[in-house]
Image: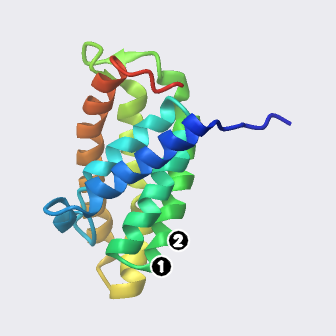
Amino acid sequence: MNQTKWTVRDMAHIALVAALYVVLTVTPPLNAIAYGAYQFRLSEMLNFLAFYNRKYLVAVTIGCMISNFIGFGVIDVFVGGSSTLVFVALGVYFFRKYQKEYLLNGILNKAFLYFSIFFSISMFTIAVELYVLYRSPFLVTWLTTALGEFASLLVGSLVIDRLAQRIDFTK
């Protein structure tokens, strides 16, 4: 069985990315648009780090869970955290083959674009949660959370792609 053994450096990277996710989500004025039926989380751009190394999947999941606990409560820790873990892992698995192919003059990776669409569609889990807890209209909530997610991921894809040209996220 192939087991991943994390070093102290890996754990520090996980902690730093999780902390960055929390800061980008709960810090004013960003927190005003990070929760509820109309979401735009700049921190979601960190999801793309999982394409470079699996440890970042753990980091963004932990960051999401902490942010959801601070801003929305225990139920969202499990719903949002599980959604992040499952759909980021699936996105990385499904779109890894596009990782080396570039679109839009090398600025936007196809995997990033496809992942943005895929993860935006996955926001149905948040729409279901908001429908069950607050009777938010499901389809409208799904549309608004998906659009916010798509916008934040598109911005994030540009940022992470540029950073990856200077920083080796694979280590």
Name the residue nearer the viewer: 116 or 139: 116
Name the image quarter holding the N terminus.
Answer: top right
Q: Quadrant of residue 127?
A: bottom left
Q: Disc 2 marks which residue?
A: 78
Image quarter of residue 144: bottom left
Give the residue drawn at x 50%, y 60%.
Answer: 83
Position of residue 75 in the picture relative to residue 139 (left or right)? right
Q: Is residue 54 visible?
A: no
Residue located 39% across and 69% down the image:
68
Q: Are marks 2 and 1 in contact (CB under 8 Å)?
A: yes
Residue 3 pos. (x, y %): 78, 38
Badge 2 amino acid: Phe
Farthest residue toward the front?
Answer: 8
47 to 140, vertically: above or below: above
Which residue lies most toward the left here? 29
Which residue is depicted at the point 23% across and 38% down?
A: 155
Judged left or right of residue 122, residue 144 is left
Q: CA distance from mark 2 to mark 1?
A: 6 Å
For label 1, the residue is 75
